[in-house]
Image (spheres, helix red, strand yellow):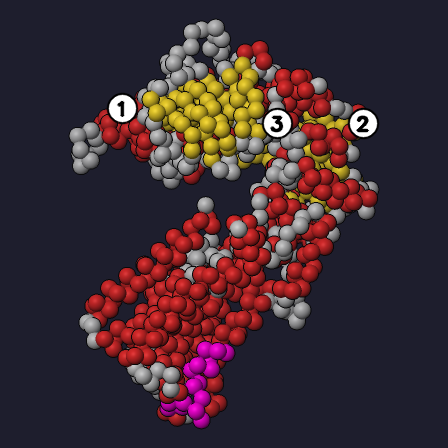
Amino acid sequence: MRNRLETAVRLSGRAARGNLDLVGLCGLLVVVLVVYQRLDPTLLEPATITILSAQFLPLILAAVGQTIVMLTGGIDLSLGAVLSLGMAVFVINTADGTMSVVTAMVIALAVTVLAGAANGALVAYAGLPPIIVTLAASFLWGGVTLIVLPQPGGHVPTGLVRAYNLGWYGLALPAIAIAVALVLWKVVKTTRFGLTLYAVGGNEHGAFANGVNTRRVKIVAYGLAGLFTGLAGIGLAIQTGSGDPTIGTPYTLNSIAAAVLGGISFFGGIGQMRGTLLGALLLGLLTNLLLFTGISTFYQMILQGVVLVAAVAVKTLATRERVA
Amino acid sequence: MTLLNVERVSKSFAGVTVLREVSFDIQAGEVLALVGENGAGKSTVLSLITGLLTPDSGTIRYDGEPVRAWSPHRARAAGVASVHQELSLNPHQSVAENVFLGAWPSRYGLVRQGDLVARARPLLERVGLDVDPRTPAGRLPLGAQQLVELAKALTADPRLLILDEATSALDDDQVRAVFRVVDDLRERGRSVVIVSHRMGELLTVSDRLTVLKDGEVMATRRRDETDHDDLVRLMVGRELSDLFPAKAAPDSPQADPVLRAAGLSIPGACAGVDLELRPGRIIGLGGLQGQGQREVLRALFGLRHHSGQTEVDGRPRRLASPREAIRRGIAYVPEDRKTEGLHVVRSVRANLALPSLRVLAPARALTTVSRRRENELVEELIRRMQVKTASPAQEVRRLSGGNQQKVALAKWLPARPRVLLLAEPTRGIDVGTKREIYHLLRELADEGMAVLVTSGDTMELVGLCDEVLVMYEGAVVERLAGAELTEERLVHASVVGHSTAEETSRA
């Protein structure tokens, strides 16, 4: 019996193990969704889906960016600042008209990708710890953002804001954006670069000894994180209809929380993006749920902390055997 | 045709010369073995060939051209592939992904898992490995992981394959599979450099053998001109007048054991190890690298969960944590000084005082440490151990390896431990300091301490210890003492895995 079990486990291989971690999260998500449905029966109507996906998009994309960095064994504490920066650059460059919006997006994304790649270059070439580099960068980009956009404001075409938040010919644009971003990741993950990302995170020295250009991998990883963070900032700008130079701050820690909840290892090399997606959804839904219940925000924060620790602790204890 | 030429290459680390004017060459279609004791410089030579290190002086010619700006990347591109004892696999990626690590075959930039698996299969078959290529590499047994490394090295169809203790974790069938690969490479005009502790293997598979000793080439012999004894003589032969102190008189009355372990077992590391440590005696744990010696020490110091009985002074005591072990008078000087033995970025003073804080600040945890008493203690230890340091305030990482080791050992002395456990006490240390450490260990033993030493250096074990237990695959296979304790017997038991007596009785 035991033998058969072992064989089954071995045969199902990595896919099953990856999913096993996620089964718990999925279960938790279902529970949260059921409770949510009770409190808000419109949950599954298109309008609600549009609004919720608009609300969750920044966190999901930020967490995707954070995950990419964490897979290399790093961490990005400047994510929130870069998110604000992308948002600020976007709103000061937009005007009415499709072309101008697209141009503004491109400029904003170029800025955030460069900001990310700069982090990566410092980590890769100066050999500085990612936590220090990105902490310093968070101050730096925070300051730059305030120069670009000293106070909340800026302009996003109202037509775009309406279409994004209320649906465009019945399509939930933010949900589509999330889907596109995830497909983009899926493609990236399938490239050599994607495999290298896991290789560097799992055993950097081994990857180096096998001729992998570990420095370039890190720079590209941080740059890619910048791209997703920039997208998150643009999404947030369109959702709120304006820019705010300090609105990004909480996304730093929330993105880390989502990634950790989704099973991304702090030491790199382990974790799946679908886990991060589940983690971000859970965090977002849980926050909303607590809002419905009308508990004081203080208790909400306490509860969030407890949920996070409990989830990670359960996961660690459940998978400890593997390490020993 | 000469593929690789190493000419008068020297290399030193932190003032310690590791290689001195080393020269040898490898022909195309040749298998060359590098032989030598631990610390003879084999690994350094290999690191120079693979581009992980650059020589201080001398030249390396590859394919007739002196190599410039050699790096792992360039060496690989030039057709040098290597398999090391230390694995470079990513445990979290699949076997197939690891086989092609860094050079994944892709189509339109995309890597398809099905393709990876299909391409990995024949390579795995070639090295005699029957596993699902989709299994995460970290889940395979060590031997299988080593074969995955070999398969990985073969992906690029290397011109020069380096096998650095690549068979250390393999069973006989697996070793044969590796040798089939080596023979096949030779037939196709490829070259192989092989390093192994298992002399018999080397004499079977290689064409020539180059013997290294203390960083110098002693000789290069064709396989048909040499044999096991000849090689051992070349590896070992050297003058050692007063390197080692006199041993305890073998017929002196033996005191009761301070520490006794019976049936000590750690899953995957050692099984059923019995040992008794008595005051005044230095016991050695020998054998090939990684046969469980280190884990026995770690278990006795409470760093590894273990089963079996441990007794201190005849009373059963659980040694479940370093705290308990220290309380029972056990001290441990680990193999890796930098992570377990010392706080390298802190001062010599801080390191020496750390185990004695209870003495220096006796009353309560809140009393401050007396600077004066701390200074006295530290000065005394530095004097006694002859630690060469600019001042007690110097950072430990600025000291040479030998002086670091002295600090790692000295810090336990004020607590007057009764059992001293040392792993590889003289690794990477120059001969002069080695001598000092040997004499100090004997002094401590004479004062009534029980000492247990692991070492990969057979000469050290034979010269220093009163008795040596030889470990093989986690079990003690031989106990040598007195006149029986010779390098030949020790090496034999280490390699063969059972005692000489057993062999004669079998024959």
Q: Label 2, on which residue?
A: B224
Residue in view at x 56 percent, y 59 percent = A12
| Residue B474 position in % (x across, y down) | 53, 31
| Residue B353 position in % (x across, y down) | 30, 30
Q: Nearer the viewer, mark 3 or mark 1?
A: 3
Task: Using the image, determine if residue A308 lies above or below residue B474.
Answer: below
3D distance between C-alphas at marks 3 and 1: 49 Å
Q: Looking at this rendering, what residue extends furthest in the front direction? A: A1
Q: Main secondary structure of the magenta part?
A: helix
Question: What are the residue bounds of the magenta stretch?
Answer: A160-180
> Per the image, is A161 magenta?
yes
Callout 3 crowding tier (Cα within 10 Å): few <14, some 14–19, many ≥20: some
Which residue occupies the foreground of this view, B441 or B184?
B184
| Residue B18 position in % (x across, y down) | 58, 32
Mark 2 near mark 3, Cβ–Cβ under 8 Å? no
Q: Label 1, on which residue?
A: B376
* Residue B173: quarter of image: top right
